Amino acid sequence: MRREGRVRRMTARPANAHQARLLRLLRDGGPNSRAQLGDQVDLSRSKLAVEVDRLLETGLVVADGLAASRGGRRSHNIRLAPQLRFLGVDIGATSVDVAVTNAELEVLGHLNHPMDVREGPVAVFEQVLSLAAKLRASGLVEGFDGAGIGVPGPVRFPEGVPVAPPIMPGWDGFPVREALSQELGCPVMVDNDVNLMAMGEQHAGVARSVGDFLCVKIGTGIGCGIVVGGEVHRGTTGSAGDIGHIQVEPEGRACACGNRGCLEAHFSGAALARDAEDAARTGRSAELVGRLEAAGRLTAADVAAAAAAGDATSLDLIREGGNRVGHTLLASVRTQVYRQSLPLATGNLPIVLGELGPAAGVIGAARLISDHLFSPA
């Protein structure tokens, strides 16, 4: 990999749990007064003043205008240092998304590039570094204070290393965290891509007000992020939520993982596209025939568009997969889950689409590294 030049790193970390809590409150809630911060932490007024003053000395937070009056002398608002920048990287099976955020995780710049993860870590990270360099060249950022990376497979989280990822040949055991930290010159954290999508929706999307939820991604592969009590549940081996390789059809289709009948083999985006091409070539759908002739290949997006246009074959393909996965068009999601679950389990279970779309992964990646950096050193 080519090195894009070392960049500055955060010069300070919170000294204790109180400071870490204050930093996360400012990240999630934006600028706030000392009095309002005091309402949210279990500190005396004098102790709060000490911790805020220490954070101001480190440069992690700055004064930000006068706060609204609550009687008596008005104080200044406090906000996270405006120059802090985080890099969020979402590596999917067929593309790479890279974004830069400020300390409050607002996306300042976002780039996407097609990329086959099967080309291996070196080729993929060359592309990541190239996109990161473009963000720097745009003037949005001088350097990165930290980076979060998502990959489409299980990750041994403490070390930031992929573990036997089914669709990522050449990635098993690759030191992603260490390698990119050296290249970028900043701290790096690595996690499964769907876990990061869940964190993104938790921070700024549909899951902002809940502590327990599942985030299901159906793309080239299928995965699930599990959040319990506000924390991502990864499992001992990093494979919690790897629902794509649950067997749903004994002796079914061969899967990339080496087994047969996996959910992913029957209703991932790739499987849906393959079934659609079969339907087109056998003349079962004039709509799909036309799309195949125009583009030379079909994607899951083509099937969705054909279904939206009323194509019966495309609707059947989606419904057939929905019977296995329980998740497809939102109406089918609800139908399958409610039909196959006990009423007690689903009586207060909203099932909704994510709000952030392609930004969920990169925002989650930025949240991951900020969680790390806004923890006591």
Image (cartoon, grey):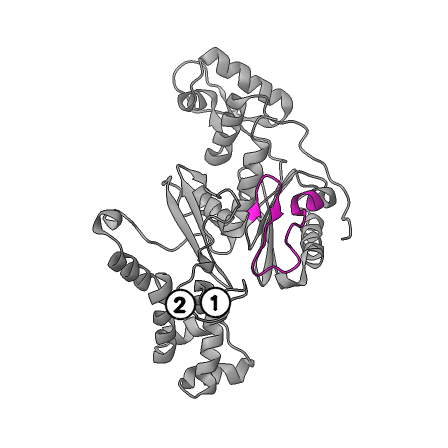
Q: Is residue 236 left or right of residue 128?
A: left
Name the residue type under label 2: Glu
The spot of residue 351 in percent (x, y) is 32, 53
Q: For the residue labelled by badge 2, is the local secondary structure a helix, a strand or a loop?
A: loop
Q: Is residue 179 magenta?
A: yes
Q: Main secondary structure of the magenta part?
A: loop
The spot of residue 50 in percent (x, y) is 54, 14
Circle 2 packing at 10 Å, graded few (<14), some (14-19), many (20+), is some
Quarter of image, res 257: bottom right
Q: Which residue is mark 2?
A: 249
Q: Residue at x 47, y 70 (%)?
A: 271
Name the residue type under label 1: Arg
Which is more toward the observer, 283 or 162? 162
Give the magenta range. 155-180
The spot of residue 145 in percent (x, y) is 65, 37
Q: Residue at x 45, y 84 (%)?
A: 280
Marked residue nearer the N-terminal end (2 or 1):
2
Q: Are marks 2 and 1 in contact (CB under 8 Å)?
A: yes
The Cα–Cα distance between marks 2 and 1, rounded to whole angstroms, is 8 Å
Which is more toward the observer, 258 or 206? 258
Residue 140 visible in rendering: no
Q: Is residue 84 left or right of residue 313?
A: right
Q: For the residue labelled by badge 1, is the local secondary structure a helix, a strand or a loop?
A: loop
Q: Residue at x 77, y 45 (%)?
A: 5
Quarter of image, res 59: top right
Image height of 23 relative to 295, above or below? above
Q: Which residue is mark 1?
A: 260
Residue 210 visible in rendering: yes
Quarter of image, res 288: bottom left
Circle 1 packing at 10 Å, graded few (<14), some (14-19), many (20+), is many
Q: Which residue is outermost to the bottom?
A: 283
Image height of 320 relative to 166, above or below? below
